[in-house]
Image (cartoon, rainbow, N blue to C red):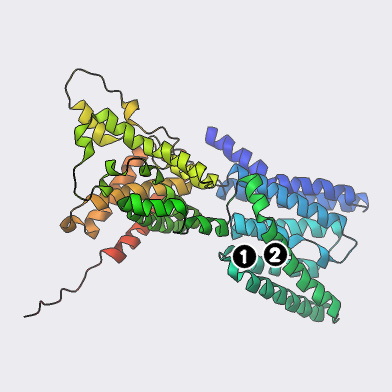
Amino acid sequence: MKARYSRILRTVLAIMPILFMCIGGYFSLTSEPSRKITILLTVVLIIVILGGYVYLHRKQLAFNHLMFITMVISIVGLISFYIRDSSYLYMPLLIAVMLIAMIIDAQIALLMHFALIAIVALFVGQGTVFLIYYGILGVVTAYTVSYSKERNKMLLIVASLALFSGVLHTLLAYTIYDVFKVSEILLAMANSALSLIIVIGSLPLWESIFQVMTPLKLLEFANSDNKLMQRLLVEAPGTYHHVQMVGNLAEQGTKSVGGNSLLAKTGAVFHDVGKLKEPLYFIENQNGGPNPHDEIAAEDSARIIIEHVTYGVKLAQEHKIPTAIVDIIRQHHGTSLVIYFYHKAQNYNDGVDYPEEKFRYQGPKPQTKEAAIVMLADCVEAFVRSLSEQDRNLEKIRWIIGEITRQKFEDGQLDECPLQVAELRIIGEAFMQVYNGLYHERIAYPEKG
């Protein structure tokens, strides 16, 4: 019941920008009552379709994303209404689709864009050319900017979009109006170029206000030159190589179910930075040397292991790591049980009661697809890394993936994230693709005589 109300709330929030825009558009109408009623009924139909889509298919939209969409669509829509007496080439409609595609994804950007241009066309009296122009340009723009992950390519993207806009407007003008105006072509090019420049310049503001992440920002933090990554490489090299492998698994797993693969990879790279506090207490950094856990009590071992999450969050916040990545650090173990040391304590037979709560991580459980997939990738990679060389084969790895997924599911660690049961198998197959590249069959070359 709680999940259902959450979906309803998110659906309402998703259509709020369209509602705000419609209120503004309604007061700008000067048409006769019958036309107003027709427009409003059409708008209601668009809202119902939009709301149905969000309710059924976009459950993973976070609250801050919904607020961001509301703000962007409302501002762009209202500005478009109040400059309706000018040419539609002045309207800032591309700003909305660019921002949403960059920060969320192209699919939801296009959904909002089509709803936006349809309602603007109805309220301001634009026709076929307006819809075709902004419809085609919106699709091209959304997919172009959503795949632009490097700042040094932005100039090329600005130029390309501007050129495409000019060509598209020319073709439409010739086809429908048989008119050629150089001024309008230049205006179309300037609109696209200026829109993208405004979007790029305003990204830090949106990131700060709504705590959203762009691909460009994520790439900056995923860079191996990051101070925390450099410390991990020097002070905990085993953990460094572990997180790189978890990053590869998380990236492929998230991509396979339509999540933010770059966020998952970046979160995975940082998820174990808390091990910098006591690196030798983690087996990947011991290099076959003495295990310090042999000298301390099981509950102390569990405390040190569990503290790597809280210390990781503290360290990440001190280094100004974005909230989305900090959340993955905090959630990547959920409320899982530190099984080895819990069983070790139970086997003391000393008459002392060792409550399970002391051997569980503090949580919360993963709240997003990305955090849940990092959890699974982390456990799978740790298990595979612990195997001896002769046991590290694809059949064994496939069993490990299935077993860990089953354990996390049965322990309720995946209850609060939007992953569906059917997606767990898809994620497992994506993990296997990564391991297939590492442990594929090799030709046995004969030894030299």
Can residue 336 be seen in the rendering of this structure?
A: no
Which residue is painted at 70% across and 57% down in the image? 96
Is residue 78 in view from this perspective? Answer: yes
Q: Residue at x 34, y 38 (%)?
A: 410
Residue at horizontal 86%, vertical 61%? 125
Give the quarter of the figure containing the C terminus. bottom left
In the displayed structure, 246 sits above or below 209; it is: below
| Residue 196: numbered disc | 2
Task: Give the foreground label among 1 and 2.
Answer: 2
Q: Is residue 163 above or below residue 64?
A: below
Check disc 1: other Cα within 10 Å, few if <14, some if 14-19, many if 20+. Answer: many
Discs 1, 2 touching: Cβ within 8 Å: yes
The residue closer to the viewer here, 393 or 285, is 285
SS for tag 2? helix
Residue 417, image x, y percentages = 47, 42
The residue under the point 71% across, 56% down is 115
| 149 left or right, relative to 390 | right
What residue is pinned by disc 1?
145
Task: Please identify the quarter of the rendering in which residue 332 is found.
Answer: top left
Real-space CA distance between mark 1 and mark 2, rounded to the nearest whole angstrom = 9 Å
Dot 1: element: helix
Point out the tag, 1 or 2, that comes first from the N-terminus. Answer: 1
Query: Mark number for residue 380?
Result: none
Q: Mark 2 Cα within 10 Å, few/some/many (few <14, many 20+)?
A: many
Horizontal and vertical percent for residue 203? 65, 55
- Residue 404 left/right relative to 271: left
Query: What kind of residue is marked 2?
Result: Leu
Q: Position of residue 407 (x, y in %)?
A: 31, 41
Identify whether 58 is placed above or below 293: below
